[in-house]
Every structure is written in C-alpha cells, then in structure tokens.
C-alpha cells in the first residue's frame, strides 16, 4: 500500500492535486499536543479581554507608539528591551532547533495549533470517519455532501473571524472592535485577515509549512547530525512485509501505513529525515500499538538525524547558542533594571536662548515632556543641579497612568552668579524612589571668555 493509496502526500508527489486525510490517533504525543496547543490557543484568545489596571493585558497602541503589558507601559524609550526580546526569541528558536529540530512547528506553531486542535477535530465531527470522508470527496455532489461542506466551511469561517478579530484586538482593544466602533482600517484588516485564514485552514493547510513558512526553508542550516528528530529504524524495519506470516528475512515493519495516515504533513517517515517533518511525534504513537501486537519495540522514535539514540548535547554549536543567549538575557535584565517609570525629554524652547530681566536675573526657558509609564498616578518633582542659587519655575502636574504632558520650565539665576556664557547643568526629575537626570546647558549674556566654573560658548 503506497502513501498515495492512503490519501497522503509522498515526497515528490504533486501536492497541488493531493489532500491529506489525517487519521486521528491516541498516545502520549497526541495528549502532549492537547496539553501544549489548547493552553496556547486559550491564552491568545483571552489576553485582549483580561483587564489589568484599566488596560488590556497586552495592548499595542500604534498611533501613540505605546505597548501595555500586564499594566506596565513601554514607550519608544524602551526600544532596547524590544531588541533584546527579538534577539532572544530568534536565537532561542535557533537553539531549540539545533537540539530538537522542528518541535516548535509540531507543538507550538499557530498553524499547527489551529489545524490540529480545532479545524481537523471539527472537520471529523462534520465529515465523519476518514474513509467515509475520502469516499464522499471522491464522489459526485449530493445533498449530503453539500450540507456537510456548507456547515464545515461556515464553522471554519466563523473561527477564522474569531482568530483574526482577536489579532486585531491586540491593536484596537476588543471592546472597540467587536462593538463596531473600530475605524475602517481595523475593520478592513479584520476582513482581509479572516479571508486569508479561511483560505489557509480550508485548502492551503500543510502547504503553508512546506512552501511558504521561512522557518522550513532555513532549518536545514540549523540542524546537524546530532539534532534530535523523529526517525525510523530502517536497519530493523526493512525490508517491509505485511501480515503475521511474512517471508524469512523480512524486517519488523508490517507496512500497515498508519505512520503515514496520521501524519499532518502527509509524509512517509520511513523515507528518512525530511524537511517537511514537523516533529509532532504522532507517527510514534501510531507505530507503537502495531508493534506491540507483534511483540516488537517501536520502529519510530526520537533519535539523531544520523540515526543514533544518544546525541552529543555539549557540541560547539550548542555552547555558542548558550553563550549568545546568556549575553542577550543579561543585557535584557540590565536594561530592565535601569528602566525608569517616567520618560523624560528636555529641550530648549524653540526660538529662545536667554532673557535678562531688569534686575539682572538671567532666565532660560525649556520644554519638558513627561510620560508616566507606571500603573499609578505620578507627581514628579523638578529641580536642577550645577547652577548656584538657581530657581526652577514649573507648574505642578499629576500624570495619570500612561499620560504624556509637556510642561514649560523656567530656570532663573540671580545676578552676580558669575556664570560663563554656557554652563552645564542637570535637570533632575524625582518620582518616588526613581530619579531621572538629564544633561542640559544654561545660557547667559557673559562674554565669550568664561568665568571659572563655566565654559566657553
């Protein structure tokens, strides 16, 4: 029995005219899929709806360039944190791939989770068992076939709308999107994304992993002979022979084809290591009960790419990834520890340099921009350092969580202070135990040759 007879796609076959009719299976890895996929899906769907300190648990505010994460506000000033996160995610994926191949694809990828945990289960509920489904699809259109397709496609369309709407809700909040108060762009983006998801989940499916996903293209450069992946024991399994009464010299494989029919990618694991394999382990579950009936150990197992059961875990590639990840996470922790609860921008008021009052007081005017990144209201205290007897005039302000405000700041120095034409100073913003210090300069009408303590302008 060939893979094509089993309704699957074998390597080299024309995938455009083939369809994977997956046979459901049980076993450890099948249950592990449930334990990994369903929580991931639940977290994705629920996060925008969970309020934390007056904001969704995760909310990306693109117009104001803000990110809310569990009540904490991140602004463009925290851009380095995002760089560390992206680098950590990338090298973390490289590290896991070098160790365990495409386990991300098999257990955590959104494409796999949506298909395996929702779409294919719903499809089996509507279409019935695999053989019945295959015969109905191969036969002519009837009322029975039509209503089943209509119900299935309607259900997948609604699910696609839910998934797409949830994604857009991370940017607009669900209360705005799902009540019809979102703008035209958000509504249109939801419709386009729903259509793409519907096309993917109904027809494209595993073709996305094989032809479009960039990870499938470059994973070959990330794996080596010691990478652990799902493999077939060819030495013990070949040559294949069906049934209990097999010829002398036959291998342990009875050529039942179950490892092919359960594969969500429609490949035959017995053909060796293949880039299409997503390391989901379902073929391991399928082979185990068959081999038990024949008193044989499982022919499919987790092994190295070159067929060994024990990989070398401390090879140079793995150590290099560990070192890089250590630097990335160390940098992230260092940057996070230095993060302030308020963003401060301090600039001289455009068009002004200094003003000398009638009594000789020199006044510089600045514009102070503050953004409260804390979940509680803040009342900052403003002062300056480096200017003797300086007086700071600034309106008192209490910033609500996430609020940004610009305040005029006047720094006045009494006559006879002996300042140079340009004198360095520091603006200090105190918020509780947090202190932000910004370097600035104070201008005066002194001659170019400065007094002691000042600088030449």
Image: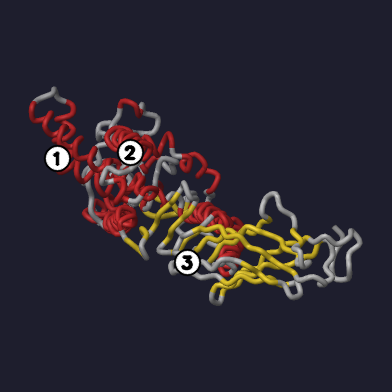
Q: Residue at x 35, y 29 (%)?
A: 15
**Element on which disc 1 rests:** helix
Q: Quadrant of the N terminus?
A: top left
Q: Position of residue 296 (x, y in %)?
A: 28, 55
Q: Position of residue 237 (x, y in %)?
A: 35, 47
- Whether residue 239 sits left or right of residue 313 in the image: it is left
- Whether residue 128 sits left or right of residue 111 in the image: it is left
Q: How many labels were placed on the picture?
A: 3
> In this figure, which residue is indicated by the disc labeled 2?
187
Q: CA distance from mark 2 to mark 3?
A: 31 Å
Q: CA distance from mark 2 to mark 1?
A: 30 Å
**Element on which disc 2 rests:** helix
Neighbour tally class for label 1: few under 14, some 14-19, many 20 plus, Cα within 10 Å: some
Earlier in the chain: of badge 2 and badge 1, it is: 1
Q: Position of residue 113 (x, y in %)?
A: 32, 49
> In this figure, which residue is indicated by the disc labeled 3?
374
Q: Quadrant of the C terminus?
A: bottom right
> In this figure, which residue is indicated by the disc labeled 1?
126
């Amino acid at each position: 029995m060939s893979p094509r007879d089993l309704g699957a796609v074998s390597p080299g076959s024309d995938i455009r005219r083939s369809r994977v009719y997956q046979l459901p299976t049980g076993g450890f890895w099948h249950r592990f899929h449930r334990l990994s996929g369903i929580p991931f899906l639940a977290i994705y769907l629920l996060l925008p709806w969970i309020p934390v300190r007056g904001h969704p648990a995760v909310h990306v505010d693109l117009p104001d360039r803000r990110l809310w994460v569990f009540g904490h506000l991140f602004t463009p000033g925290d851009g380095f944190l995002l760089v560390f996160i992206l680098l950590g995610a990338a090298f973390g994926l490289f590290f896991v791939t070098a160790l365990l191949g495409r386990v991300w694809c098999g257990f955590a990828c959104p494409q796999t989770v949506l298909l395996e945990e929702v779409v294919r289960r719903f499809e089996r509920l509507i279409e019935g068992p695999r053989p019945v489904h295959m015969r109905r699809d191969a036969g002519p259109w009837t009322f029975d076939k039509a209503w089943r397709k209509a119900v299935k496609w309607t259900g997948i369309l609604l699910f696609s709308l839910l998934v797409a709407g949830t994604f857009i809700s991370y940017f607009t909040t669900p209360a705005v999107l799902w009540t019809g108060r979102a703008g035209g762009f958000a509504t249109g983006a939801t419709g386009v994304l729903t259509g793409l998801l519907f096309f993917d989940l109904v027809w494209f499916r595993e073709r996305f992993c094989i032809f479009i996903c960039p990870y499938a293209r470059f994973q070959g450069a990330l794996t080596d002979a010691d990478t652990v992946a799902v493999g077939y024991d060819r030495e013990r399994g070949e040559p294949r022979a069906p049934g209990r009464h097999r010829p002398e010299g036959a291998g342990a494989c009875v050529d039942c084809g179950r490892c092919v029919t359960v594969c969500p990618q429609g490949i035959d694991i017995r053909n060796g290591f293949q880039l299409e394999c997503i390391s989901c382990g379902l073929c391991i579950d399928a082979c185990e009960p068959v081999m038990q009936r024949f008193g044989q150990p499982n022919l499919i197992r987790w092994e190295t790419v070159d067929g060994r059961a024990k990989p070398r875990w401390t090879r140079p590639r793995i150590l290099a990834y560990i070192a890089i990840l250590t630097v990335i996470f160390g940098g992230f922790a260092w940057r996070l520890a230095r993060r302030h609860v308020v963003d401060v921008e301090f600039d001289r008021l455009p068009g002004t340099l200094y003003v000398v009052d009638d009594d000789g007081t020199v006044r510089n005017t600045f514009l102070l921009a503050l953004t409260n990144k804390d979940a509680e209201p803040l009342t900052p205290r403003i002062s300056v350092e480096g200017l003797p007897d300086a007086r700071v005039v600034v309106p008192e302000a209490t910033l609500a969580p996430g609020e940004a405000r610009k305040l005029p700041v006047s720094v006045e120095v009494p006559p006879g202070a002996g300042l140079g034409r340009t004198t360095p100073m520091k603006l200090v913003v105190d918020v509780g135990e947090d202190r932000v210090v910004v370097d600035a300069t104070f201008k005066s009408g002194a001659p170019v040759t400065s007094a002691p303590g000042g600088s030449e302008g």
